C-alpha cells in the first residue's frame, strides 16, 4: 500500500551536465560522457532505494531534455535548423526542431540506461517517455500538416521503443503529457487515442503523467493566470477513466487543483503529487502523510501511489535528495496512520 514513486526526472550532478537547467549542456563527450551518465544513473538508483521509494527510475540522467532526448533517435527531423515556436498553447516561445519527412526510429533510444537500471535494482522500474501530444507541441511540423496525424505517427515510434523497454525488463512505462493541460479538448478527442497507439501490445503497467509543468518562471506565471481553481483535468479525466491506461500521475500538493477531480479517475491507479517541485521548501513526512490522507477521500487506498508533482530535473541536487527522503518517510507514516 502507498508504494512511493517519482514523476521521473532528477537533477544531473555537476560533473555530468550544467545544473539547474531543463536543457543543460553535457560536461564531456564520447566515452567519458557515457561513463558519467552511467555513474549518475547508479547514484540516483541508490538514492531512491535509500529514500524508501518502491518504484524507481533512471532519473532521466542519459537524456538532455524529456522530449528532445527521444527526438535525437528519430529520423525525419531537422534538429540543426531550429525555428522559434510558441509551445504549450503559446505559454512560452522555444527554439524547436522541424519535422521534415516521414518519421522513423533510427534504432533503440533508451536501451543502455534501461538495461543498466534493470541490472542494478530489484525494485520495480519505471521508465518515462514523452507523450505523443506533448511531442507535437514541441516540434514544428512541416510534413504531416495535421497535429493529430503527426502525433499518431510519433505514437507508433513510441510504441516501438516501449515494447523494447518492456523486453528490457521495465515494469512501468509512463508517457509525459503536460500538453494535455494546455489543450484539454484535444486531449479528450485525440490525445488519448494516440496514447492507446503508444501502449498497443504492452503487458506491463502503463501510466500517463499530466502536470502543470516544471517549476520554471514561465509555468509559475501561467499558474497565476489560471484563477482560484484549476479545473483543466475535468475536461479529460472521464475519458482517461474509460481508457486502457492503468495509472494517472497528477499534480496535487500546493496546487489549486480541486482534489475532488481525482474521483473522476475511478478504476485507475492515481499517482498523487505529494511533493512540490516548484518550491525549495522540503516537505515534512507529516505534511506528505496529510496530503495522502486528504486524497484518500477521493482515491481508494489500494490505488493511491504517493508521487512528486512533476520531475525534479531543474532543482538543486541536495534539495531533490531531501525531497525524495520526505516522500519515502511520508509514505511510511501514511501506512501506519491509514493501514
Ligand atoms: Zn510534469
Image (cartoon, rainbow, N blue to C red):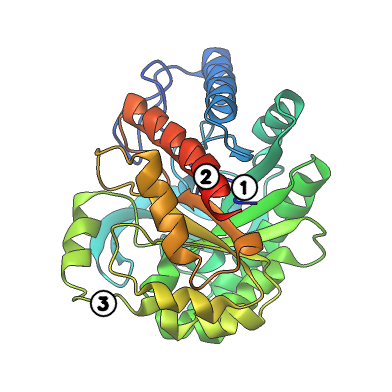
Q: Nearer the viewer, residue 14 or 220?
A: 220
Choose the circle earlier in sequence order: 3 or 1: 1
Q: Nearer the viewer, residue 12 or 48?
A: 48
Marks 3 and 1, how far apart at CA = 28 Å
Choose the circle earlier in sequence order: 2 or 3: 3
Kindly state the secondary structure of the residue where label 3 is placed.
loop
| Residue 113 position (above or below residue 128) | above
Q: Position of residue 274 (x, y in %)?
A: 41, 52
Any part of residue 139 in sight:
no
Circles 2 and 1: CB atoms closer than 8 Å: yes
Q: Residue at x 20, y 75 (%)?
A: 228
Which is in the foreground here, disc 2 or disc 1?
A: 2
Which is in the foreground here, disc 3 or disc 1?
A: 1
Q: Residue at x 63, y 40 (%)?
A: 54
Marks 2 and 3, how far apart at CA = 27 Å
Circles 3 and 1: CB atoms closer than 8 Å: no
Give the residue at mark 3.
Answer: 229
Q: Which mark is residue 14?
A: none
Q: Position of residue 213 (x, y in %)?
A: 34, 57
Q: Which mark is residue 331?
A: 2
| Residue 65 position (above or below residue 301) | above
Q: Nearer the viewer, residue 237 or 87?
A: 237
Give the residue at mark 1.
Answer: 3
Marks 2 and 1, how far apart at CA = 7 Å
Q: Position of residue 268 (x, y in %)?
A: 64, 70
Kindly state the secondary structure of the residue where label 1 is placed.
loop
Amino acid at each position: 500500500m502507498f508504494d512511493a514513486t517519482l514523476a521521473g526526472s532528477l537533477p544531473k550532478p555537476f560533473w555530468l551536465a550544467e545544473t539547474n537547467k531543463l536543457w543543460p549542456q553535457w560536461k564531456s563527450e564520447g566515452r567519458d560522457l557515457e561513463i558519467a551518465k552511467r555513474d549518475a544513473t547508479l547514484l540516483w538508483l541508490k538514492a531512491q532505494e535509500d529514500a524508501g521509494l518502491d518504484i524507481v527510475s533512471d532519473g532521466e540522467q542519459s537524456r538532455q531534455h524529456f522530449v528532445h532526448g527521444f527526438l535525437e533517435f528519430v529520423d525525419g527531423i531537422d534538429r540543426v535548423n531550429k525555428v522559434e515556436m510558441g509551445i504549450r498553447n503559446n505559454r512560452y516561445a522555444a527554439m524547436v526542431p522541424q519535422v521534415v519527412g516521414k518519421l522513423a526510429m533510427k534504432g533503440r533510444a533508451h536501451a543502455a540506461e534501461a538495461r543498466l537500471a534493470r541490472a542494478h535494482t530489484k525494485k520495480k522500474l519505471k521508465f518515462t517517455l514523452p507523450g505523443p501530444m506533448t511531442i507535437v507541441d514541441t516540434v514544428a511540423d512541416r510534413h504531416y500538416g495535421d497535429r493529430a496525424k503527426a502525433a499518431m505517427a510519433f505514437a507508433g515510434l513510441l510504441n516501438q521503443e516501449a515494447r523494447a523497454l518492456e523486453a528490457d525488463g521495465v515494469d512501468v512505462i509512463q508517457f509525459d503529457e503536460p500538453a494535455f493541460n494546455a489543450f484539454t479538448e484535444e486531449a479528450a478527442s485525440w490525445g488519448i487515442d494516440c496514447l492507446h497507439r503508444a501502449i498497443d501490445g504492452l503487458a506491463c503497467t502503463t501510466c500517463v503523467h499530466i502536470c502543470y509543468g516544471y517549476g520554471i518562471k514561465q509555468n509559475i506565471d501561467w499558474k497565476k493566470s489560471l484563477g482560484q481553481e484549476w479545473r483543466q483535468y475535468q475536461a479529460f479525466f472521464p475519458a482517461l477513466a474509460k481508457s486502457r491506461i492503468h495509472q494517472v500521475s497528477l499534480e496535487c500538493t500546493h496546487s489549486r487543483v480541486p482534489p475532488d477531480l481525482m474521483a473522476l479517475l475511478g478504476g485507475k491507479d492515481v499517482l498523487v503529487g505529494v511533493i512540490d517541485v516548484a518550491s525549495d521548501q522540503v516537505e515534512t513526512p507529516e505534511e506528505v502523510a496529510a496530503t495522502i490522507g486528504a486524497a484518500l477521500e477521493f482515491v481508494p487506498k489500494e490505488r493511491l501511489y504517493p508521487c512528486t508533482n512533476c520531475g525534479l530535473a531543474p532543482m538543486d541536487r541536495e534539495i531533490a535528495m531531501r525531497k525524495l527522503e520526505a516522500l519515502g518517510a511520508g509514505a511510511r507514516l501514511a501506512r501506519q496512520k491509514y493501514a
